[in-house]
Image: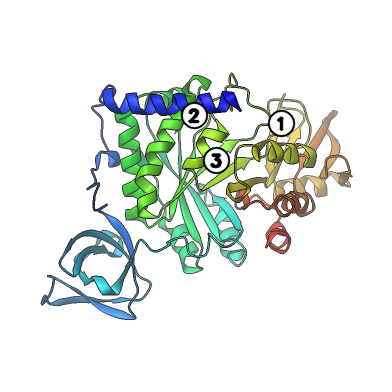
Amino acid sequence: MQGNLLTTVLALVFYLTSSLFGGNSASHSNVGNSSYTQNNYFPRSGIVSAKQTGLRDNYQNGATLSTMNQGSRVLILSEKADWYQVQVNGGQQQGWLPKWAISVHSDLTGNMSKQKVIAGYYVENYNNNSAGYRALSENLGAINMVIPFSFQVDQYGNIQSSHSPRPVNLAHSAGADTLALVNNINGSNFNSNTVHHMLSNSAARSRAVNGITRMLIEKGYQGVNIDFENVPARDRYYLNAFFNELSAELRPRHLLITASVPAKTYDDRTSSQSGAFDYRALAPYLDQIMIMTYDEHYSGGPAGPVASYPWVEKVIQYSLNSIPSSKIVVGIAAYGYDWGNWGSGKALHYQGIQNLIRKYKVAPQWSSKYRVPYFTYRSWGKAHQVWYENSASTSYKAQLVRKYNLRGVAVWRLGYEDPNIWSTIQQTIM
């Protein structure tokens, strides 16, 4: 307890001193160099609350440009008297709407504060594989939050976008919320140098925070999911400062602040995977914390469960010492690993695993200890072990959400899963 208190105090001291003395300014800029009016918080998101209202080319007595329908999202740029200047249709048009016709700073997360979260991470497929989009479209009756894996931050704090409107529009059409996922991938990996340089430079942090804020509003997201991985353990205080600053910018705009964080059962401050993540210090700045309770056994290690029931429960129990249960979202794996010829495990989605079962005519077994399925087979004289997740193993994780009254689940990733997991989750936690 004393150690955690000291961490929080030191993080606050660091934040205050870094704000006073700043850091090395970066010459690069992108989306993140936008500035905001701190008192009025423009731009802001809004929703047309009137059944219909006219978009005018000037406030008061301007000519009508088009008709806006109830539920339309707008970006509010400024205000004059009883009117808002707005941007609509993805930035294609600007005009003026009466203030009475717009709901501003409403709870853009719909009923998310009142219900369990069933989230799916969405990754664009670049080889014409529509599995992710198909999984999303077929399960929107159960999924109420979609997290597109769409944005990267560089070492200067610039936000690089690969935004696709398809999953966002589809989610919104069904009343689901969307969170823009921002990661530190550089090339094909989560880059520790990139995130270290960004976090440790106050100007870069500020640029990232401003860029994230503008991106969420302009693209119509309801919040952000920060997925920083391989963060150097020495950047623990910088990471706290980043979330402090992000929270100060997003909460007045009623935008959700969430993070995907590594699972752990104790606080190893030297760990290259989890050492930078101080659960207790981060919890006040975050609305939801997606704990990545998977890769208990991973491709580079020995064969075993991706997420055994005892391990997941142990992670949850440790997390509850520092994080309110209402903020904890349990990460659900939708994949497995095949350990065999490659010298390490090969990741497989559920359909790929079913193909192996049919090809080698094997009968999957059930581990009563770990509460997950597995099987073995031989190929080219080599023994293989396959451990994976399905709807049965997922049901046990969902029961933990109910047992500990947690916020919900987040599935990695859409299109990889046993199709039956969504109904299983919905029936168990709702």
- Residue 21 horizontal/vertical position (percent): 27, 22
- Residue 118 horizontal/vertical position (percent): 61, 57
Instruction: Calculate the distance from the C-alpha at mark 2 to the C-alpha at mark 3.
Output: 20 Å
Q: Residue furthest front?
A: 2
Q: Are marks 1 and 3 in contact (CB under 8 Å)?
A: no
Instruction: Calculate the distance from the C-alpha at mark 2 to the C-alpha at mark 1.
Output: 39 Å
Figure check: 212 above or below 75? above
Q: Which residue carries the number 3 mark?
A: 260
Q: Nearer the viewer, residue 87 or 324?
A: 324
The reply to whether residue 158 is in sight is no
Q: Are marks 2 and 1 in contact (CB under 8 Å)?
A: no
Q: Earlier in the sequence, mark 2 or mark 3?
A: 2
Q: How is the image coloured?
A: rainbow
Query: Dot 2: few (<14), some (14–19), or many (≥20) neighbours within 10 Å?
Result: some
Q: Which residue carries the number 1 mark?
A: 345
Q: Earlier in the sequence, mark 2 or mark 1?
A: 2
Q: Which residue carries the number 2 mark?
A: 8
- Residue 101 horizontal/vertical position (percent): 28, 74
Q: Quadrant of the N terminus?
A: top right
Figure check: 52 above or below 364? below
Please tell me which residue is depicted at 50% across the width and 48% down the height of the picture: 287
Q: Quadrant of the C terminus?
A: bottom right
